[in-house]
Amino acid sequence: QVQLVESGGGSVQPGGSLTLSCAASGSGVVINSMGWYRQAPGKERELVAVISNIDIRSFADSVKGRFTISRDNHKNTVYLQMNSLKAEDTAVYYCNAISGRLSIWGQGTQVTVSS
């Protein structure tokens, strides 16, 4: 059974930076793609960024040029570096991992951007 543990959320002022981490645990785990989604109050969950197991990356238009995604395959960990944060980036951020036909979600971590 694969579990995802997220860390790194918090509060930051506009223009600031945060880094989110998500580690997948479980014996014999084979992770395909990993990514981050977010959900703001009253809005649907949306894709932020995703990275495949061969380092192909995709980003939402709203975060291109500000966010980067990377992964450590040996640690089954994905990172989301968020720079130049804006108030509209405020949301609960969820880690997602695809393992075979399974789609696994983390518990979510709050990111608040406010002055």
Image: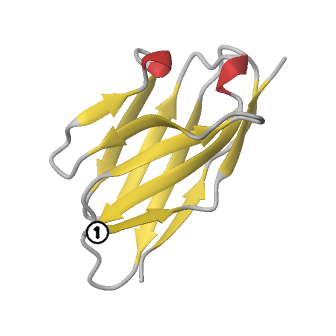
Q: Is residue 10 above or below residue 67?
A: below
Which residue occupies 62% across, 47% down?
8
Assign the N terminus to one quadrant of the image.
bottom left
Residue sticking out furthest to the right: 115
Left or right relative to 82: residue 70: left
Tag 1 secondary structure: loop
Asked whether residue 66 appears in the rendered view, the answer is no
**Amino acid bearing label 1:** Arg
Residue 50: horizontal and vertical position, in percent?
35, 41
Q: Going by the image, does 23 lie left or right of 57? A: right
Indicate the colouring scheme. Answer: secondary structure
In the picture, measured across the screen, residue 58 lies left or right of residue 112, that is left
- Image position, residue 95 (x, y; %): 50, 53
Residue 16, placed above or below residue 92: above
For mark 1, does the 10 Å Cα neighbourhood hold few (<14), some (14 to 19), or many (20 or more) residues?
few
Give the quarter of the image for residue 20. top right
Q: Residue at x 26, y 64 (%)?
A: 74
Q: Residue furthest left?
A: 54
Viewer can see residue 101: yes
In the rendered image, the vertical position of residue 47 relative to residue 24, given as above or below: above
Which residue is under mark 1?
A: 101
Q: How many marks?
A: 1
Q: In the rendered image of this protein, does residue 79 appear above or below residue 85?
A: below
On the image, the x and y values in percent for residue 60 come to 43, 25
**To which quarter of the image does residue 114 belong?**
top right
Where, quadrant-wise, is the C terminus in this rendering?
A: top right
- In the rendered image, residue 47, in percent from the top left (x then y), is placed at 47, 37
